[in-house]
Image (cartoon, rainbow, N blue to C red):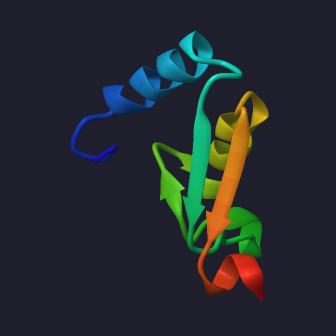
Amino acid sequence: MARANPEILQEIRTYLKKYAGRYILLVEGSVPLKDDGVYCMIGGRSSEQILKEAAKDAAAIVAWGSCASN
């Protein structure tokens, strides 16, 4: 989605600020950390960087799946 429409990342940031402290962040799957996260980059940022930004003002974070529980 971000590759097809680069403006979507800015749109996500806008909503994160607008609803700070009032959203639930859902996380499924692993977050690649090896080699500074180059194995999952979106808009030039690693998934770890994006997750940290989204998690900062979340009211709650729910992680599920085998990666979350093992």
Query: Quick one: which residue is furthest to the left in this view?
Result: 4
Is residue 16 positioned above or below 54 on the image? above
Residue positioned 57% across, 73% down in the render? 29
Residue 22 vertical placement versus 27 (above, below): above
Left or right placement of residue 4 versus residue 66 in this view: left
- The answer to which of 43 and 56 lies nearer the viewer is 56
Where on the picture, by quarter, is residue 16?
A: top right
Query: Against 29, is 45 above or below?
Result: above
Measured from the top left, where is residue 22 in percent x and y?
63, 23
Residue at the spot x=75%, y=64% of the render?
36
- Which of the image's four quarters has the C terminus? bottom right
**Residue 65, position in %: x, y?**
59, 79
The residue located at (25%, 36%) in the rendering is 5
Q: Residue at x 28, y 47 (%)?
A: 1
| Count of marks overlaid on the render | 0
Compared to residue 60, the image places residue 31 above or below, namely below
For this rendering, which residue is in front, 31 or 46? 31
Asked which quadrant contains residue 48, the reply is bottom right
Which residue is nearer to you in this view: 4 or 30? Answer: 30
Q: Position of residue 52 (x, y in %)?
A: 74, 43
Judge from the rendering whether residue 24 lies leftward or rightward of residue 52; answer left or right: left
